[in-house]
Amino acid sequence: MLSPNVVNLIYLVAAVLFILDLKWMSHPRTAVRGNLVGAVGMALAIGATLLSQQQEWSYILVGVTVGSVIGAVAALKVKMTSMPEMVGLFNGFGGGASILVAGAALIAAYSGLAHGEAMNLQEKIATVASGIIGSVTFFGSYVAFGKLAEFLAVTWKLHPWQKAVKYGFSLAVAAGGVWYGYGAGFDRWAIVTAVSAVIIAALLLAKQDRFPGMDALKGLSAVVSVGLGVLLVMNPESMDLFWALVATGGVLGVLLTLSIGGADMPVVIALLNSYSGLAAAATGFVINNTALIISGSLVGASGVILTQIMCKAMNRSLTNVLFGTMGPTSETPDADEVYRTVKSTSAEELAMILDGVQRVVIVPGYGMAVAQAQHAVRDLANLLESRGATVEFAIHPVAGRMPGHMNVLLAEADVPYAKLKEMDEVNSTMEQVDVAIVIGANDVVNPVARTDPGSPIAGMPIIDVDRARTVVVIKRSLSPGFAGIPNPLFAADNTLMYFGDGKKAITELIAALKES
Amino acid sequence: MSDLVMLLTVFVLAIFVGFEVITKVPPTLHTPLMSGSNAISGITILGALVLAGALGEAPLAKILATVAVAFATINVVGGFLVTHRMLMMFKRK
């Protein structure tokens, strides 16, 4: 048995290692070491905890084994293009763990077989916070995952696995709530739980992002959650109140995430990341554990910073992302009018243009991930470099569906990180770029953001490819991006549209270049 | 100093440390930063372990805590592993 002082000292060491982990994330060279150090810190903290009390190992072994297998398989199998889905889902597990620890602590203190010490006010309030934040994180993350994996809030036909997850999860939530309510004899709080669970299940089957009365329901669920929280602080022995609070928090979590559009997905994932940290910190206040509080705060801070960066990169406030809408306005120009002068090109013509160029900038977007074109793009860059050109990648902060998504895909394709440039760095020398190749990006290169103050993307910082000598846009069609507005770049004098699937188009371009 | 004030002190100072350290992470590494911080938020496992392993606790509390152990382990194991996988890609060149 380790004494509490020794355990707390080991927690301190773990906290220092977590801080070093994040500190060493500041450079790709040191980041691997940082991550390993973080893992060591976690192992130390877990080891100290296990040695701090007499254990009954059976439950622990079951939990750890199941969790390790699922975690390891997911981590080793996931495709880099699906990283947003995985991180989105994992945030939810953190939130779920916080709910369950708070619930178990409440039972242990008040309604268990061996009544523990009654909670003090701090612990009661923290239990309420863990329940609400944990539940918002858990259900919000599920919605984020579902939207990224394209099976929630969509109208098209689903794959069998998508159907199984979508209907299975909804059914489980509704059935769980009703079964619990039945077991509790449908007393008043159990009715709240059952009704909320059914509302969650119904919301998860919705086919659109928004519907009338959504904001009112959002407000109602927030008020009811907090009200139940106050009641729980006064009556901590009522587990019915705790579950009712978790259920209404779940309604809030679903609504908060459901209403957010595809373009704002990077913000949502960053925000949920921050919630999962705050949930862990709140749980730390439930069980008076400094390791949880420190780690939770670090993660919370990380999520907040990323959220700010994403909002700034879209020139939108967080309130606007959470409650506002984005889409074509009444002043949106007619697409046919804008696209009157579009010039389309072929692989052969492009090969001639790219012959002998000095400086090329490639601007990837989410379309590159969808087309799995990152390896073909790398081949193109290497080929151009072997012919004497300098090739760089210009990456917009919100390109892709999570912060840094494009960078990971290009790193997977062995593009050296020194070639991955930030928006401002490339923009300052855009006039000297011979050819800018845009692949699968749209809104982040739309010059309207600079020129039209009435546009939904007005003021958003963009990559100024229109200032390059020649712009090549690789795209399937002239369809609009998330913002739903036409892009005059496509019809500019110096722009050539190269229509086709990203990967195939680039492969053909490479072949044409090799022939020329 | 009461326990609550001590814990709040730790909480607030840690947030400041987090802001200082994470502001320096370059955009290139934002995805591994998120998956790595995800792994760190699996720290909830400490609370889950204490409750799942406690002797003579109510079965319901232990079952909830066991599920919490599983959830948090997914975060810890999956988070650190996938972050390592990504960071090795950045390191190659």
Image: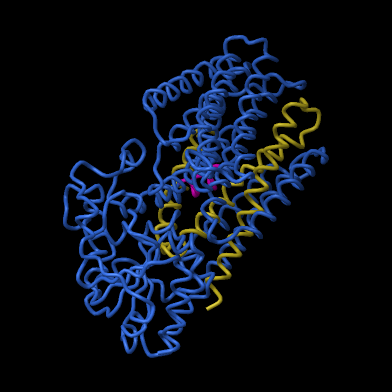
Q: Quadrant of residue A388?
A: bottom left
Residue interval drawn in magenta: A293-300
Can residue A507 be found in the magenta stretch? no
Q: Looking at the colours in the rendered structure, which chain would you say is drawn in blue?
A: A
**Residue A115, horizontal then vertical, whole percent:** 72, 21
Q: Residue at x 74, y 42 (%)?
A: A63
Q: Quadrant of residue B26?
A: bottom left
**Quadrant where the N terminus of chain A is found in the figure:** top right
**Residue A258, horizontal then vertical, whole percent:** 45, 36
Near-viewer residue (B64 or A345): A345
Q: Quadrant of residue A104?
A: top right
Magenta-drawn stretch, dominant element (helix, strand or loop): helix
Q: Residue at x 39, y 27 (%)?
A: A214
Near-viewer residue (A86 or A174): A174
Whether residue A247 is situated above or below residue A65 in the rendered picture: above
**Residue B10, horizontal then vertical, whole percent:** 49, 43
**Quadrant where the C terminus of chain A is found in the figure:** bottom left
Near-viewer residue (A387 or A139): A387
Image check: A75 left or right of A272?
right
Whether residue A455 is situated above or below residue A423 in the rendered picture: above
Q: How is the image coloured?
A: by chain
Near-viewer residue (A72 or A290): A72
Q: In the rendered image of this protein, which colour is used for chain B?
A: yellow
| Residue A453 visible in the snapshot | yes
**Residue B79, horizontal then vertical, whole percent:** 60, 54
